[in-house]
Amino acid sequence: MIDRLTRQVSFFAPAAVMSAWGTVMLHTITSGHINRLLNPMFRSYVLIAAILLFLLSVLHLMLYQPNATSVETRPFTRRLRPIGRWLVLLLPVVAASILSPSALSSTTLANRTALSSTYGVTPMPTMSDTSNRNVQTELAADPNQPVPMEVTDLITVSHSSDQIKAFDGRQVRTVGFFVAQPGQPPKLVRWLMWCCAADAQPVSVELGGNLSGDWKDTQWLEVIGTAEFPSTLGHVIPRINVTSIKPTQEPDEPYLSP
Amino acid sequence: MFIAAFDLPTGPASAGISWPDVALSFFAIVLEGAPFLLLGAIISGLVDVFLPAGLIKDWLPRSKAKGVFAALGAGLIFPLCECGAMPIVQRLIRKGVPPAVATTYMLAAPALNPLALFSTYLAFRNQDPWLMVVLRFGFSLAVLIFLGFWLIRLRPDQMLRAETLLGSTTKSAELSANPGLVLTPRPGMSFGGLQQFTGAVIRDFTGVLLFLVIGAAAAALFSTGFNRNLLAPIGQNLFLGPLAGILLAQLLCLCSTTDAFIIAAFTPFSIPAKIAFLVAGPLIDLKLYWLYRSAFQPRFVHGLWLRALAATFILTLLYSFKP
């Protein structure tokens, strides 16, 4: 009886596990949760993988059959081991898809901030072709209106003295989440994601000026103010001298991708 | 170079662990890795069906030493990421490629990958890109040659798990590449190799996926819970800097095409520390340790780990002390 059951389980397990992975992948894509997990480049790969996994499950059921005769001579506990392996394949990924939150917390932010005070000071590795193009468009924008700029664009500007000259004192509008660490100026932060959420790094600009309001850590804000590029110890730190600040929705793409 | 002096961390060493974030990171790593693993399994399945066992063996040079260099060259020409390489390498071994040669290719493909070198150039664009690219490539190559010549002295049974050695040539489930997976073909449904192909893909994908899941859990835990500032104070130290770089690579478990961007922004590290990070990471880390365990004996993987890190450390230390 048990023997027959384990034979049935070991026949259906591969198809069940592969379909479960396919379902989790599809659900992650359709729910939009994938925007919080992977760089856009990798998202279509997940979709293709999901389809292939469903196809493989069907092929498995079509082309293979349950083992008819028992060849089991192993003790009962050793026979359960294969089932344990299938559960390791099944349970963690399903649990993670249910339990994973919509955003990384400020705890992880603190762990992943390598010397927060110098962020944006160091040559920040934006694969800055995109960011450079953004900056060119932003330079050409109407100077009487606040220019919409990403945190990374402001950091890109801070690397070039010509662009600093062009942007210094311009009105900019930037979206990010609020972080105030003790002993440091408040910051507007975005996660920069290279491949996936596990390698996301925080990047930030400093906020000065009128910050009136009770802003919580990691609350999403839209900030309008004057772009400034003060230099400390020979390093330029981009800062927004805020004139208007208000809560806003989390963007559809919460991470910036280089 | 002296910036670190102004910025030693003042806060607590670790901000703690956010378990939901560990789940998020774990989920992201497996979703990123699984499609590449599946691609690797599909290529492996195609190799299984279409490539006659003796063919690659005939292409390869007779001498093992030349085989190692051929594997290094293949690593440059046929780039593969860490997850995708695993099933293919196991298949190549079962098709008769000497384990030392196949293993050298497995180690070389992510490290010497032209994409990895290009992303290194981009990441260090503002810092001294050519120096970083040349050092990364040169040191990786040196470590790989050292490892390759260690590998050719080992017997296959010292390296590989029994099931990798025997693989699909045996009918016994216990000895198959994926213990626990019993595939009984339906008679008359072979469809010109489709049955064999499907079986090989399922066997390879689910077999290595188990180790990706375990490795991703370890990687998610440390990349989320470990405070990077902990290593900052020793990152400029002549001796401890390279060690800090190696340790960080082991804990963060980044793909070789991404790691340069993360470390380029890590100001508290000296150049040797950054190079140590870039050379050691693609060879082995906590995630790769588990992936390698899918094909190799634990004792061998430990030996590989020790040698890869020691060689990286010695090279970067020599560079630290260069006149």
Image (spheres, helix red, strand yellow):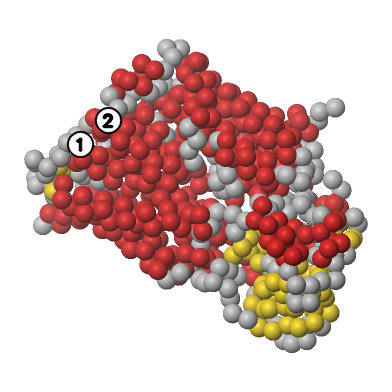
Whether residue B314 is visible, yes or no, is no
Residue placed most toward the observer, A64 or A149: A149
Pinpoint residue B266: horizontal percent, then vertical percent.
73, 51
User: Which element is circle 2 on?
Assistant: helix
Dot 2 crowding, Cα within 10 Å, few <14, some 14–19, many 20+: few
User: How many numbered discs, if any?
Assistant: 2
Dot 1 crowding, Cα within 10 Å, few <14, some 14–19, many 20+: some
Residue displayed at 88% across by 65% down: A230
Residue placed most toward the observer, B305 or B21: B21
How far is the residue under mark 1 from the one under mark 2?
A: 9 Å
Residue displayed at 34% across by 36% down: B44
Which residue position holds label 2?
B50
Pinpoint residue B51: horizontal percent, then vertical percent.
30, 27
Pinpoint residue A175: horizontal percent, then vertical percent.
67, 73
Q: Earlier in the sequence, mark 1 or mark 2?
A: 2
User: Which element is circle 1 on?
Assistant: loop
Residue placed most toward the observer, B220 or A54: A54
Which residue position holds label 1?
B193
Question: Amino acid under label 2?
Answer: Phe
Question: Amino acid under label 1?
Answer: Gly
In the rendered image, the quadrant that contains the N terminus of chain B is top right
Rendering quarter of residue B112: top right
| Labels 1 & 2 near each other (Cβ < 8 A) | yes
Furthest toward the top, the residue is: B62
Whether residue A59 is visible, yes or no, is yes
Pinpoint residue A126: horizontal percent, then vertical percent.
68, 54
